[in-house]
């Protein structure tokens, strides 16, 4: 059953910090409660519901790809809502084709990071339970991205990301990427991230 598979996958995430420990525990309890975890009705029913983010990383160029999301008015990883009974990895594969126009190349089949976040930029705010996946990318790739959803897309060095205009957990994601060796520890200018 997909719920138990998602539950097992979440329990295998190695947490970065106390906040991620708390988010994982919240999501485990939420799934165990029997509550609906997939979005059934747009924009926010049920609240919360599952989302899959995917972050493309070009390790040789030490850059990551973010999209300038129209509805949220933020620089975010690409991604989308997990459809009913869909595996979040399949969500990433589907959304990668829909939003960026290319095939997904996973660095790991499992989510790297988990967050619970109240949405912004919409009338009906709600909580997203976001599973963050890491994919291989290249700054030389041309993306026929979805202009209905995104103003633009851009490769950023970690120190260039406008953290005040991004997901509220982006600084923590960057910290985890550095600690897990995706980027060298000296890539962030001292004091630019609040670790």
Image (cartoon, rainbow, N blue to C red):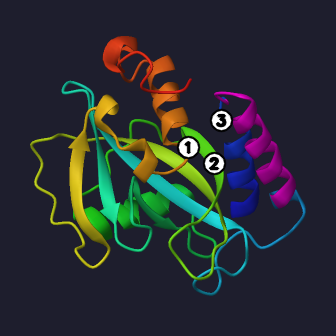
Prevailing secondary structure class for the magenta stretch in the rendered image: helix
Q: Residue at x 24, y 72 (%)?
A: 146
The answer to the question of whether label 1 and label 2 lie on touching residues, with beta carbons closer than 8 A, is yes
Q: Which contiguous range is marked in magenta?
A: 15-30
Q: Give me the disc on residue 169.
A: 1
Q: Which quadrant: the C terminus?
A: top right
Badge 2: few (under 14), some or many (20 or more) residues near its Cα, within 10 Å?
Answer: many
Relative placement, left or right, of 42 versus 79 is right
Front residue of 103 and 153:
153
Q: Position of residue 15 (x, y in %)?
A: 67, 30
Relative placement, left or right, of 148 versus 23 is left
Badge 1: few (under 14), some or many (20 or more) residues near its Cα, within 10 Å?
Answer: some
Marked residue nearer the N-terminal end (1 or 3): 3
Front residue of 166 and 178:
166
Relative placement, left or right, of 18 versus 72 is right
Q: Residue at x 39, y 66 (%)?
A: 73
Badge 3: few (under 14), some or many (20 or more) residues near its Cα, within 10 Å?
Answer: some
Can I make out residue 92 in this image? yes
Q: Which quadrant: the N terminus?
A: bottom right
Asked if residue 159 lies in the magenta stretch, the reply is no
Q: Nearer the viewer, mark 2 or mark 3?
A: 2
Marked residue nearer the N-terminal end (1 or 2): 2
The answer to the question of whether label 1 and label 3 lie on touching residues, with beta carbons closer than 8 A, is no
Q: Nearer the viewer, mark 1 or mark 2?
A: 1
Q: Residue at x 33, y 31 (%)?
A: 158
Q: Give me the disc on residue 45.
A: none
Helix, strand or loop at mark 1: loop
Q: Which residue is mark 3?
A: 13
Q: Which residue is mark 2?
A: 115
């Amino acid at each position: 059953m997909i719920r138990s598979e998602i539950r097992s996958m979440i329990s295998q995430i190695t947490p970065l910090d106390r906040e991620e420990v708390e988010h994982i525990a919240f999501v485990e309890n939420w799934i165990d409660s029997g509550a609906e975890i997939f979005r059934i009705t747009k924009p926010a029913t049920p609240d919360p519901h599952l989302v899959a983010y995917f972050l493309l990383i070009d390790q040789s160029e030490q850059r990551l790809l973010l999209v300038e999301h129209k509805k949220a008015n933020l620089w975010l990883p690409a991604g989308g809502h997990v459809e009913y009974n869909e595996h979040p990895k399949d969500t990433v594969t589907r959304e990668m084709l829909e939003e960026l126009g290319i095939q997904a190349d996973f660095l790991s089949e499992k989510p790297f990071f988990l967050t619970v976040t109240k949405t912004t930029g919409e009338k009906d705010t709600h909580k997203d339970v976001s599973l963050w996946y890491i994919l291989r990318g290249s700054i030389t790739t041309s993306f026929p991205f979805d202009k209905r959803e995104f103003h633009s897309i851009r490769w950023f060095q970690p120190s260039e990301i406008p953290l005040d205009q991004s997901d509220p957990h982006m600084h923590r994601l960057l910290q985890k990427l550095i600690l897990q060796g995706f980027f060298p520890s000296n890539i962030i200018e001292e004091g630019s991230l609040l670790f």
